[in-house]
Image (cartoon, helix red, strand yellow):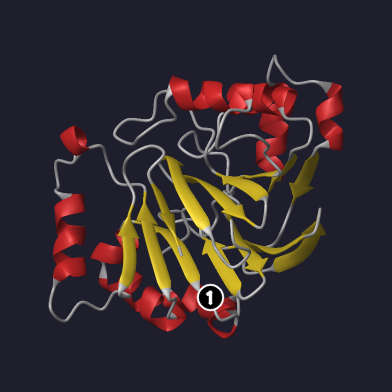
Amino acid sequence: MAKETIKITYVSCMGVLINYDDKNILIDAIVSPDILPYRTIPQKTLTSMLRKSEPFEKIDFILITHEHPEHFHPDLVCHVLSHCPEAKLVAPKAVIKSLQRSRLFKKSFILQCISLEIGLNKSIELTLKGLRFDALHLAHDGDNPKSATQNIAYLLHLDNHRLLHVGDALADAESFRNNELLEKGITCLIVPFIYVITETGVESILQLNPLHLVALHFPLKKHDKLNRFANAEDIRNAANSPLPESTHFLTECMESIMF
């Protein structure tokens, strides 16, 4: 694959596999089997990870935004860590603690894990195995000011690309301003669908002005009682759509896009 090409493969809910320059990066992809109305990770896909079948021949990074079950499952993550000793896991402190309580946790995993504790609207820069990325604590959507949820967004620096996965960050442009993200030159933005169908979410997208937008976290079709996907499609297809020309809605496991 050409070095300037990013491949994003949808796995589950907000979960993706990002391939760039021979690096495979999983973000929020290893989730609970029971997360209705959202899409979980199929057993076939999980088996491919464990057997290191294409496109999971190796997993360099497992990045987790927060501890909620549609973003993380401790036992399944332990399974993957056992089969992928090359993988580095980066996650908030609450995720690491949950992993350590799993019956499948091994002491050797400590060498693979990096625990994050970052204040709200603060960030740190990391460079691991040749990958440079920022971890940013963005307010979790729906949380009250005293909530303990530490939602960590990940900004990947991939040569000329800057890819931001927000987890379940509040769709609010002010939050992005507080974290100085407007000056980062985001080229690819990965967000929950709520950003596409709300005024505050669209304003956040406009402020960041990405070249590529990827929306995830849609309810499964038969559970989409409020027609979220249809609403998002209407906005994307409108003649005066505020969304980037390169906007993608991913809903089917192992569906991929490249740019």
Image point 14% across, 49% down: which residue?
Answer: 227
Q: Position of residue 24 (x, y in %)?
A: 64, 46
Q: Nearer the viewer, residue 182 or 140?
A: 182
Q: Which residue is mark 1?
A: 186
Q: Dot 1, crowdedness within 10 Å: few (<14), some or many (≥20)?
A: many
Question: Does residue 196 sit above or below 102 in this rendering?
Answer: below
Question: Does residue 173 sit above or below 218 in this rendering?
Answer: below
Residue 252 falls left or right of residue 60: left
Q: Nearer the viewer, residue 97 or 112?
A: 112
Q: Position of residue 10 (x, y in %)?
A: 43, 44
User: Residue 54: which quarter of the image?
Assistant: top right
Image point 34% across, 49% down: which residue?
Answer: 250
Q: Name the residue type under label 1.
A: Ile
Image point 71% across, 23% down: which residue?
Answer: 83
Q: How many marks?
A: 1
Q: Position of residue 58 (x, y in %)?
A: 68, 37
- The local secondary structure at tag 1 comes to loop
Residue 143 falls left or right of residue 81: left
Whether residue 167 is visible to the viewer of this picture, yes or no, is no
Residue 60 falls left or right of residue 47: right
Q: Position of residue 18 (x, y in %)?
A: 56, 51
Question: Does residue 234 sit above or below 1 in this rendering?
Answer: below
